[in-house]
Image (cartoon, rainbow, N blue to C red):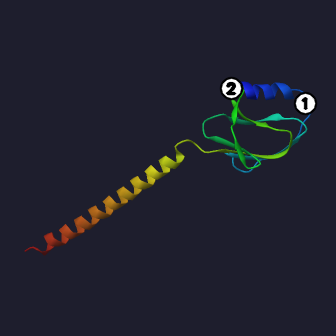
Amino acid sequence: VDSANLNVMERIRGGGQDVHLRMEDSSSRWDVSATSPEPFVLAISQNFMKGWKAYIDGNEVSPFSVNGVLTGVAVPEGGHRVILEYEPPGLKAGTLISLVALLFLSSLTCLVYIYSRRNGKRDGERP
């Protein structure tokens, strides 16, 4: 935890928060409604890794590691909607590479099939 987030964590220890959680079906997305009279750190029980993105009321904020393991977000006082989403790094590039490879192999299979059919007919026509 960097010094700015550590300062927030120290200021809010022992504060009474009224936090309401609502999690969607996916473990890669958390949608949380939170209300508190003081700033607090929202920590979810998901390992902190590259790929986590956090939004407070639609504005992107930086998530951080809590206790070296969990994923956390510093939430200001008041009522807020916090969304945490995880997208594995390289997912888009890997999907694109897989699609290009599938297209290439499909085209190659079609060409081999067409070539073998044409050569087979020519061989069958000879006396």
Residue 81 x, y percent position in the rendering: 80, 48
Q: Residue at x 85, y 26 (%)?
A: 11
- Residue type of the residue flagged with mark 1: Gly
Q: Is residue 70 left or right of residue 51?
A: right
Horizontal side, residue 11 vs residue 119: left or right: right
Q: Amino acid at mark 2?
A: Gly
- The Cα atoms of the two marked residues, 2 and 1, are separated by 22 Å
- Residue 64 marker: none
Mark closest to the chain's N terminus, 2 or 1:
1
Residue at position x 23%, y 65% in the image: 115
Is residue 6 depicted above or below 95 in this figure? above
**What residue did someone put label 1 on?**
15
Q: Residue tagged by mark 2?
A: 68
Quadrant of the image occupied by residue 41: top right
Q: Is residue 56 in view from this perspective?
A: yes
Give the image quarter of residue 88: top right
Residue at 27% across / 67% down in the picture? 114
Nearer mark to the viewer, of 2 and 1 = 1
Residue 8 location (% of width, % of height): 80, 29
Near mark 1 (Cα within 10 A), the count class, few <14, some 14-19 or many ≥20, is: few
The quadrant where residue 85 appears = top right
